[in-house]
Each structure stands twice: as structure tokens, then as C-alpha cells.
Image: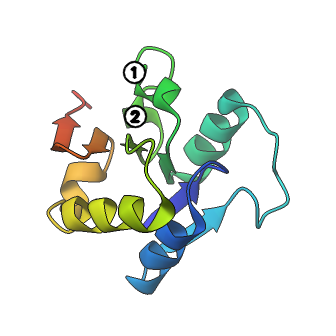
């Protein structure tokens, strides 16, 4: 899957996704640090990429409709170290299928996964 990793996403999560074979572009690696949420969304929409972020603002589907980009995955795992965050992310990410992410809003938290399906 084609993904666009927001600059707030921990590097080990990006490495994990790449290890699974996803085509992940990191904002940091692309030299785009500091771009606005709107610019992240516009780029993901143009390239039909799934946004993966720890920024809960992307949960606002009226502002950032997931059906207009590849989809949005919001990682709501806060106040934990990188290793704990990665462990929780892996545990729940493995349960998500590609069709669950495409054009939908997926939220991953320590409690589990929530999928808000778009009407496409």
C-alpha cells in the first residue's frame, strides 16, 4: 500500500510498515518537515496515499475526508515510550486488512481498532 507518514510518527513504526512491503514516504525523509496538515492531506490526495499519523486532527472527517485520499490511519497511542508504542501498534495493525484502510478512517489506540467507513 502507498502511505504518507506524518512527521510525528515514530521512525520504528515507519520502518515496520516498510518491512511489511508498504511504499511509505516519510515527511521527514522527503524534506517536507513543517508542512501544514492541509498540505499533508493535499499531497496524500493527489498521490492517493493513506495518511498515517499521530495527529488526532486528522480524525476530523469533515475537514479531512478519508475517501478523498487513500484513507487515514490515526495512531492514538500517547504517553508511552517508543518501544511500547510500537508493540501496541503492531498488535492491532496486524488485525487490519487493506480494505479496512482504503478510503476509511482507522483509529489505533491501546484499547483496539476503530474503523469509520466512508460512504464512498
Image quadrant where residue 4 sits: bottom right
Most foreground residue, 12 or 120: 12
Give the label on residue 92, or none. Answer: none
Most foreground residue, 41 or 58: 58
Most foreground residue, 64 or 5: 5
Q: Tell me which residue sits at (51%, 17%) in the image.
A: 63
- In x, y percent, where is residue 36? 74, 31
Q: Would residue 70 be seen by someone viewing this image from the given angle?
A: yes
Query: Callout 1: 10 Å neighbours few (<14), some, many (20+)?
Result: some
Q: Tell me which residue sits at (48%, 58%) in the image.
A: 81
Residue 55, relative to residue 112: is it above or below? Answer: above
Residue 79, relative to residue 120: is it above or below? Answer: below
Quarter that holds the N terminus = bottom left
Image quadrant where residue 96 sits: bottom left
Count of marks overlaid on the render? 2
Q: Would residue 104 be seen by someone viewing this image from the given angle?
A: no
According to the picture, the residue beneath numbered tag 1 turns out to be 61
Quarter that holds the C terminus = top left
Determine whether, in the image, residue 89 is placed left or right of residue 40: left
Q: Tell me which residue sits at (51%, 54%) in the image.
A: 49
- In x, y percent, where is residue 7? 67, 51
- Name the N-terminal-most of marks 2 and 1: 1
Query: Callout 2: 10 Å neighbours few (<14), some, many (20+)?
Result: many
Image quadrant where residue 113 sits: top left
Instruction: Look at the numbered disc 2 and give the secondary structure of its residue.
Output: helix
Q: Tell me which residue sits at (33%, 42%) in the image.
A: 103
According to the picture, the residue beneath numbered tag 2 turns out to be 66
Amino acid at each position: 500500500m502507498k502511505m504518507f507518514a506524518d512527521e510525528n510518527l515514530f521512525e520504528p513504526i515507519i520502518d515496520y510498515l516498510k518491512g511489511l512491503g508498504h511504499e511509505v514516504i516519510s515527511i521527514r525523509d522527503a524534506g517536507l518537515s513543517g508542512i501544514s496538515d492541509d498540505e499533508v492531506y493535499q499531497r496524500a490526495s493527489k498521490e492517493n496515499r493513506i495518511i498515517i499519523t499521530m495527529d488526532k486532527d486528522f480524525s476530523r472527517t469533515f475537514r479531512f475526508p478519508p475517501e478523498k485520499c487513500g484513507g487515514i490511519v490515526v495512531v492514538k497511542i500517547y504517553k508511552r515510550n517508543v518501544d511500547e508504542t510500537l508493540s501496541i501498534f503492531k498488535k492491532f495493525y496486524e488485525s487490519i486488512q487493506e480494505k479496512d484502510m482504503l478510503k476509511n478512517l482507522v483509529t489505533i489506540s491501546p484499547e483496539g481498532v476503530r474503523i469509520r467507513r466512508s460512504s464512498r
